[in-house]
Amino acid sequence: MEVDDATLMQLLTEHGQDVTTLESNQNGDDTQVPEDHVEMVPLPGGWLRLSMGSGGDVVGQLISDPVEQHPVDAPVVFAETDIEELPGWETENRDIFPMLGWWCRLLRDPERERYAVAVHECDVVEPRLVIAGVYPEAVLCQAESPVVVFVEPHPSKPGRARARLLPVTTTRLDDPPRVLAEGPAAGVKVEACSVRRFVKVGHGVRSNRIWQIFDLANPQEPQTILTPVPAHVSALIDVALLDDKAVLVQATNEGEQWHIDVSEFTHGRVQETRRVAIGQGEVRRVIGSDGSLLAHIKHADAHDRIESLCLVPMANSSQIFEEPEPVLSSPGTFALNLNICASSVGFAVAELRTGAPPVIWYLDPTGRVLNPSNKIGVDVHFARERITSPDGYQFDLDIRWRGESTTFHGPVIVMVYGAYGIDIDLDADPELSHWLDRGYAVATPHVRGGGDPQRHHAGSQDRRDRSLLDAVTAVEWLRSGRGAATATTICVIGASAGGFLTASLLADCTAPIDAAVIVNGYIDPLESLLRHPSLTEQADRDEWGDPQHNPHHRHALEKLSYANSPPPPPNPDSHLRQRRPRQPPPRTHVGASLPNTRRKHHPLVRPQRHPRHRNPHQNQPHHHLGHQHTRTTINGLTWFCG
């Protein structure tokens, strides 16, 4: 059905604007975490059980093991207190310090994209430190005393950001501040290492971002650890323990082969590097432990998607494990975020499969599964097909459907993104079962513009039309009946930057699609780059090109004709506006913290919020004045506004 704007607005007025028809529970309230919901987290010397208290607080209890769960010592309460100066702000994430002395939470203003970090001492109700006007990037680290590492807009350089650290007990800003790295706005990131004396810091636009590891043993003079090979992916580097000494772990993917190296270092310099494992496929992530490491591997030789976890001991200095035996394998994927520090007691792993709740596996230090009776009951079919674009480029198409048949014939939802090096992971989307339950198949093409640095580069800037070429090829393949799924009807869904690819498909008369849904879409980067510059301009140009100064970049965006199509007549009743790209909703993670009880979520799995491009100074709280750092003491609580 084709309707003009006026008719559409009339239909919305008559039938309502709520297009969500997915069932909730009978009480109409699906925002609460079950009170018996728990997570088990491995710590350096034992297991920690996290559960929700009756008042919404998180309760931590040391236990004997994740199966018997006999209590050890008294529980610790991580109090969820409201902050008077941030009314209505919601907890987005928590980082619980492994030694249980401190924890922090990231808060978000639900009305605007503004963030703050609150640092708490365990069993103390009020936070000791609040840092407002930051990016959603903050971790706790162990130095001489605990420190918080966070990212803030640069106070004197518009369009820039910096990663810095503060002791959690600070009462003043240092002059000069302890800055770890600077970079373009939206181009500075921080992540925790498994050994919490260290922190990973990334800086630079996505196409050439470099990740470094900093040793915070002396927070007055943080020391950079130089990786043997420049690190462009944070998940491929970590710090582990070997004989009570910290060692650097780095995985490298080359073609369809991988290897993992372990390096000893002194005073920031690598002294000795040795190879510990090699294999076929691609390493997605490495987790450092005490005496071993856990590698998450995607296999390259499987027609259907297979991923595995391999445990690699590090003690033997001469042995190289070739194609190490998996401790777990899955046609879905794994999330390792419950492993928040290097542990000597084992690992906690979440297995994610389309259409099924996450299943948590607990492993001992040797990789033996401690809860082998766990089962995943799921009747979802998986297919990964390699297809070829007209220019010869090959890429994968992932498909999921329910039913008894090993093939599918019916309506297909195609989810696309194709930008910022991001792929949509169907197995990590807890809401996907809503489509499958209603008889749809769901597919996502891994087009150029997403994925690893090489594939991302192949679809960025003036190569953006290649993302569209891959998407059209995927749609035609689904229509053709040559694969496992034959689409009778196709609806394309794109969120944020995926909205641009969806809009381009709508404008391409060769794309055989029947409907499209654009969620919070960034559909006209040409208009934004030419007429609406922002403080994230450097990152925007790295992704979309510089059409103002480069005619090739401008032509590449112009020929994707949706940007040049005549705009609809203005509608005074419409308040829709274009927003800058954000990470797509389907990406999820399992965290070593319980979901916020005030917001709708899926237990254990919840959306990962890391907006890629925003005005950094949007994050400033309402009482921030200018670009100067200010300190305020309110009721004994130290506030810093960046």
Image (cartoon, rainbow, N blue to C red):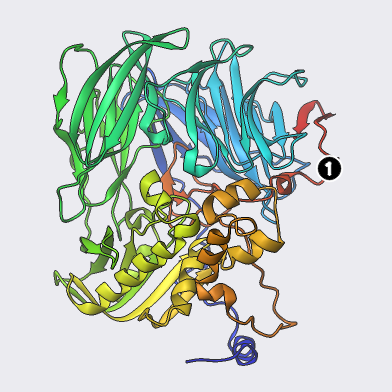
- Point out the residue furthest to the front here: 551
Front residue of this view, candidates 178 and 526: 526
When asked about the image quadrant of residue 145, the answer is: top right
Left or right of 334: which side holds 102? Answer: right
Q: Position of residue 105 (x, y in %)?
A: 60, 36
Few, some or many C-alpha atoms within 10 Å of disc 1 (few <14, some 14-19, many ≥20)?
few
Residue 513 sits above or below residue 370 on the image: below
The mark total stands at: 1
Residue 68 visible, this angle: no
Front residue of this view, candidates 140 and 232: 232
Q: Amino acid at mark 1?
A: His
When asked about the image quadrant of residue 132, the answer is: top right
Q: Position of residue 317 (x, y in %)?
A: 20, 11
Left or right of 559: which side holds 454? Answer: left
Q: Position of residue 177 (x, y in %)?
A: 71, 21
Q: Identify which residue is drawn at 28% across, 68% down.
A: 390
Left or right of 96: which side holds 113? Answer: right
Residue 184 sits above or below residue 529 on the image: above
Can you say which quadrant of the picture contains the C terminus? top right
Residue 543 visible, this angle: yes
- Point out the residue furthest to the right here: 625
User: What residue did someone put label 1 on?
Assistant: 623
Residue 304 sits above or below residue 90 on the image: below
The local secondary structure at tag 1 comes to loop
Q: Identify which residue is drawn at 78% across, 20% down.
A: 172
Q: Identify which residue is drawn at 67% across, 62% down.
A: 530
Front residue of this view, candidates 590 and 534: 534
Q: Position of residue 84 (x, y in %)?
A: 77, 41
Q: Identify which residue is drawn at 66% across, 33% down.
A: 118
